[in-house]
Image: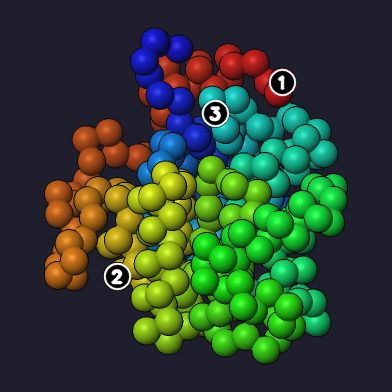
Amino acid sequence: MMVGMSVPVLETENLVKVYGQGSTAFEALKGLTFEIQYGESVAVVGKSGSGKSTLMHLLALLDEPTHGVVAMDGRPVSGLDAKKISKLRNETFGFVFQQFFLNPNQTVLENVTLPLKIAGIGRSERQRRGLAVLEQLEMADKATKKATTLSGGQKQRACIARALINEPSVLFADEPTGNLDTATSDVVEDILFGLHRNQGITLVVVTHDEDLAAKCERRLFMQDGLIVREERGVAGPSGGGPSGSGPSGSGPSGGGAPAATRRRLFGRRNAR
Ligand SMILES: Nc1ncnc2c1ncn2[C@@H]1O[C@H](COP(=O)(O)OP(=O)(O)OP(=O)(O)O)[C@@H](O)[C@H]1O
């Protein structure tokens, strides 16, 4: 690697995902090559069925590609054993989903600290860190309430707290405001982009929502398993269109990565 070149937090090379086999095989991703830099905010946009969730699952190491490579910090991830991958995932990523996935019968604090429990961290430290992150999201007063008693916006804030508890470098958000009314969506978006701006967290947002996508620095437009267009620029506060939009020079492609990228991904040491 050249001196001074920054290593992307995530990069993919010719990513292909096929669901099913034989006559029922379906190619949901048809060869995606792109990079996500540390501290970027990236929206993955596209119609239902275009492959957004499939791509997010591969990037987040929740599923494995049929072909191609996902690399984190320049190191290919495929090939690591499952235990290592889940450790990597827990240490590096936070997740926020449309459907919240909170345990309704547990308290907010128990829900938020679940990732720490999984990581084997003791009760008192879990409590301390859980309360700190709830405090940050102005949810400390809800800590001992059952998750089921929260409003939609409060549920999503609890999910964001849970996503932040491991101090991830990348936050994946899959339709994070899909179940929220407009006013509540605005609050949740402000929180997400505040984390991005103030803490340098990398945001990867999967969404149908053009307004949400416009708030990201970069948009990848998906269609039928390919990234067909890329846009850069953030919408101004007036809500106008993104500035500096238009396909970027380096543009993603469904097909070939530059040969240098290919050599780099496959040539890098696999171990962690
Ligand atoms: N487990 C699976 N088995 C078979 N086909 C699948 C599976 N998961 C997804 N697909 C198919 O792959 C394609 C892409 O699905 P994906 O969920 O990635 O799309 P999406 O863009 O996220 O859609 P949505 O916006 O509706 O969530 C779809 O045609 C879908 O039917």
Mark 1 Cβ and ligand 1 under 8 Å apart = no
Q: Nearer the viewer, residue 190 or 2?
A: 190
User: Can I make out residue 211 in this image?
Assistant: yes
Q: Answer left or right for 61 relative to 199.
A: right
Is disc 3 in contact with disc 2, using a CB cutoff of under 8 Å?
no
Circle nearer the N terminus (1, 2)? 2
The residue wearing badge 3 is 73
Q: Which element type, helix, strand or loop, lies under badge 1?
A: loop
Is the residue 160 above or below the residue 200 in the image?
below
Can you tell which mark lies on residue 211? 2
Q: Answer left or right for 26 relative to 119.
A: left
Give the residue drawn at x 36%, y 39%.
Answer: 253
Give the residue drawn at x 70%, y 46%.
Answer: 90
Can you tell which mark lies on residue 271? 1
Is the residue 206 above or below the residue 29 in the image?
below
Between the residue at mark 3 and the residue at mark 2, the CA separation in whole angstroms equals 30 Å
Residue density around tag 3, few if under 14, some if 14–19, many if 20 or more, within 10 Å: some
